Image: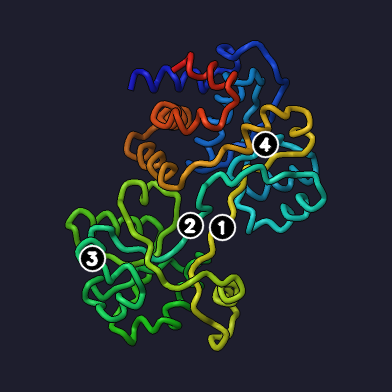
Amino acid sequence: MKKLKAIALAVMATGSLAAQADCGEVSLGKMGWASGEALAEIAKFVMEQGYGCSVTLVPTDTVPAVTSLAENGSPDVVPEVWTNGTPVYAELVEAGRVITASPVFANGGEEGWWVPTYLVEKHPEVATIEGILANPELVGGRFHNCPVGWGCRVVNDALSVVHGLEGKGIEVFNHGSGANLAASIAAAFEDQEAWFGYYWGPTAVLGKYEMTKVDIGPADLEVHKRNADPEGDASTWGVSDYPASPVANAMTTTFADREPEVAEFVTKMTIPNNIVSSMLAWKDENGASAEETAAWFITNHTDLLMDMLSPEAAAKIKALL
């Protein structure tokens, strides 16, 4: 923990430990949630300590970040832009003003229906929706649904009808909040009981509890769009898994032209979903700051980080560890 704190101080530093400036000033968007904050701190540390940039973190959120990219051409780099909820983003890419440098999550944003892995190990059939429908007692006869008002609630309500959950003996239980949904998973794991329901990742919950995604059929974008329409006609609903949500490291083309070496790092900044979930679980369990969480990633997944860097930047970062 002492080493983590020392590295966290370096993460927080505003260039005092940075190599002689090879690149200029960089504005870096810092999304207002746990993963977005940690990813921004990781990128800041690398840019300053590995490439000699002077980085300014810009607190933001998805819509303000994309709006700023459109109107101001900044920030230079924005990790973790969930692009499917921001049509303007696609227009910026098409216009050549913004580059999707890399997918920050290797598997995209994941949504779906899950069961505990220990349940699959005992009863392999529950890894598929067909196996669950044929053996509802193995999952406790209950589907844990999203709270009202969430987009997933609309999709799950459609899919529960398509798959005929209640007709097959599976109660659809609607949770009142995300906290209650997460607590139901924690309670099931504590007693090694059955659980079946919706969740998403990367998240601290999936980092703390080993879950298996249920095969509910292939993802079909058109069918999913119909399932997700709150005004949709039930006759148009169909079988479709949740498509992976594209989650980008966005970068302006002017920055890519100005700082090609740093831009190359951004194009390689992709992290496996399970590692992001583990990072978030560690943050949650330790009440850690974004800087400490970034330090945890840097020290526990150094080889992965080194693969993203130029040889010169990697040598500078290694010297600090």
* Disc 3, SS: loop
CA gap, disc 2 and disc 4: 23 Å
Label 2 vs 3, first from the N-terminus: 2
- The label on residue 245 is 1
Tell me residue 4's x, y (percent).
39, 22
Query: Looking at the image, which is closer to me, 215 or 233?
Result: 215
Q: Residue lying farthest front? A: 311
Expressed as whole percent of the image width and height from the top left, the position of residue 116 reads 28, 59
Numbered label attached to residue 194:
3
- Whichever of labels 4 and 1 marks the residue nearer the N terminus, that label is 4
Which residue position holds label 2? 110
Q: Are marks 3 and 4 in contact (CB under 8 Å)?
A: no
- Distance, label 3 to label 1, CA atoms, is 28 Å
Horizontally, is 169 left or right of 73 in the view? Answer: left
Q: Which residue is mark 4?
A: 77
Query: Picture coordinates of residue 188 (x, y %)?
Result: 23, 59
Q: CA distance from mark 1 to mark 2?
A: 7 Å
> Disc 2 vs disc 4: Cβ atoms closer than 8 Å?
no
